[in-house]
Image (cartoon, rainbow, N blue to C red):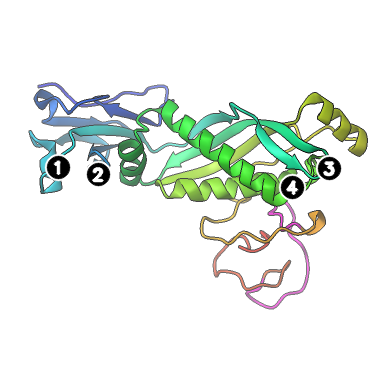
Amino acid sequence: MSLLQHSDPAGLELVAVVPVSGAIDPAAAGRLFVEDGQRAVVFAGARALAQFGRGEHALPADPTRLAGETVGAPPRVAFVSVAPLTLRWGTTEPVVYADVEIGDVELRGYGTMVVRVETPDTFVATLVGESDVGTTAAFGAHVRDLIVTRLDEVLRRELESVFALAELCEVLALRLGAKVARDLAGHGVVLEELRIGALDPPRSVGRRIEERSGREPAAGGFPPYSRSGGGAPSDAPEPPPTAPEDAGTRPMPGAPAAVGSARPGACPRCARETVPGASYCAFCGAR
């Protein structure tokens, strides 16, 4: 009897589906082996039937019986890594930003992200089964498109002109990270970190930015969104946009918190009530 398993010794794959198409081979349906750092989810269509942790497991000859009822779609197994994985992202087409001073500006961005699947059955049901995201490359493309969509939203909300890119790089990075984190949470995925490597305007616009500010455009100047410190929790409200000097920025880990007098249980920066036990203020991000 053959064994259902997927090996990834290099640790570069987030998900692999066996078989890639069709149903599980009945000859291999009896045994399932899950390696360290993996979870195996038996699914049919957009429905997760059962989840298995590390080790060898017995499967019924007809895996759809795990559902306890008739399932129309063919059963397959998704082997999901639960370890953090670093992926790259970038804009395949420029994001067109409507600048209040110089009109439409094409911005190209790129960076990296660190993701971790926290709830494998949710991930498999909502992405692998429902959206056919059955490979690491397909997941990367899905998140890339999501990032580009959210980046467009953040630019429209937070930025009045590309001449302010350098001053608002922290706000843009953290707002983008918080939005993408909320989106991925609905698929059982945690965004541990999101980095914007650069947002590059055309050379002619870049020269104008540098001439006016004495600084290069925000290439390499973006702090990362970090789940452990810099970003908002997935259920935290976004602060309303304000002037750049008081834009509700969330400090990166290690940044000094504002010092001031505040009543017990209130944020020392904005004086609003904080959630008991929280490390950061959900309104202004102060530690």
Q: What's the residue type where badge 2 is placed? A: Arg
55 falls in the magenta region: no
Measuring 42% from the left and 50% from the top, which residue is drawn there?
A: 186
Q: Main secondary structure of the magenta part?
A: loop
The C terminus appears in which quarter of the rendering?
A: bottom right
Give, as a three-letter code, the residue at label 1: Val
Q: Residues within 10 Å of mark 4 (few under 14, many from 20)?
A: many
Residue 113 vs residue 160, the one in the foreground = 160
Q: What element carries label 1?
A: loop
Q: Are marks 3 and 4 in contact (CB under 8 Å)?
A: no
Residue 217 image position (x, y, % from top left) = 80, 34
Label 2 and label 1: CA atoms lie apart by 9 Å
Bounds of the magenta segment: 247-266
Q: Could you tell me residue 281's position as x and y percent? A: 63, 63
Q: Mark 2–mark 1 contact, CB under 8 Å?
A: yes
Counting residues from the start of the chain, the first of labels 2 and 3 encountered is: 2
- Looking at the rendered structure, the secondary structure element under dot 2 is strand
Q: Residue 121: x and y, percent?
A: 30, 44
The residue at which mark 3 appears reads as: 101
Q: Name the residue under label 2.
A: 47
Whichever of callouts 2 and 4 sits on the residue coming sooner in the sequence is 2
